[in-house]
Amino acid sequence: MDQSGRVYDELLVLHVQNGDRRALERLASRWQPRLLRSARRFTGDDELAREAVQECWLGITAGLKRLNDPAKFPGWAFTILRRRCAEKIKAHAKLRPRSDELTEDNAPAISPRGEDQAAIAQAFARLPEDQRIAATLYFVERLKLDEISAATGVPLGTVKSRIFTARKTLKTLLEGEI
């Protein structure tokens, strides 16, 4: 996200904290697609992703007044999303064991267009969960390293390592595919 988008989000957060419901609607319309896209990648399942994002918004609206620094909103929102996705995955795993195979039904949504989309989706799906989350937040959502650290709850050095390893793995997986 560019600097003007970050500043606009900070302004919206401030307005929401002051009780402006229209600002909440604008914030939601800006962030809903990003959260849903990331939740699909985290969970690998459209329905689980939608449920996680819905619960994420409940957490965001309930806790937004307590967010002291509006500039921390991206990392804070993705922290809530990651936790909701983890809860959904655990609950879903208890109901039905998941297959490790990637199918069209559970392939994560990837923003590139054309034939490369399937190869990239499969490569992301083959990453270990911790690397997939870090790579998604960095390469797709364009979060800063410190925001990823805050969102995932791991040290900055670990985030850097996961992104480095994910990049290397993705390169290996995608060589000759794209």
Image (cartoon, grey):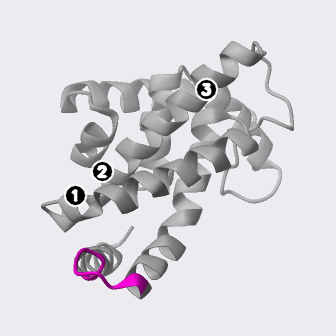
133 vs 164, nearest the viewer: 133
Q: Please, what secondary structure does the residue beneath circle 3 have?
A: helix
Q: Is residue 144 magenta?
A: no
Q: Where on the picture, by quarter, is residue 10? A: bottom left
Q: Residues within 10 Å of mark 2 (few under 14, many from 20)?
A: many
The N terminus lies in which quarter of the figure?
bottom left
Q: Please, what secondary structure does the residue beneath circle 1 have?
A: helix
Q: For the view shown, which residue lies furthest in the right direction?
A: 104
| Residue range corresponding to the magenta coloring | 15-21
Q: Marks 2/1: CA distance?
A: 6 Å
Q: Residues within 10 Å of mark 1 (few under 14, many from 20)?
A: some
Depicted 173 relative to depicted 114: above or below: above
Q: Which amino acid does the dot numbered 2 rest on?
A: Trp
Q: Residue at x 35, y 58 (%)?
A: 62
Q: Residues within 10 Å of mark 3 (few under 14, many from 20)?
A: many
48 vs 115, nearest the viewer: 48
The C terminus lies in which quarter of the figure?
top right
Q: Marks 2/3: CA distance?
A: 20 Å
- Cβ atoms at labels 2 and 1 below 8 Å apart: yes
Observer able to see residue 80? yes
Depicted 164 relative to depicted 147: above or below: above
Q: Residue at x 43, y 87 (%)?
A: 22
State the mark number for residue 76.
2
Which residue was labeled with disc 1? 72
For marks 2 and 3 on the same chain, the one whose residue lies earlier in the sequence: 2
44 vs 84, nearest the viewer: 84
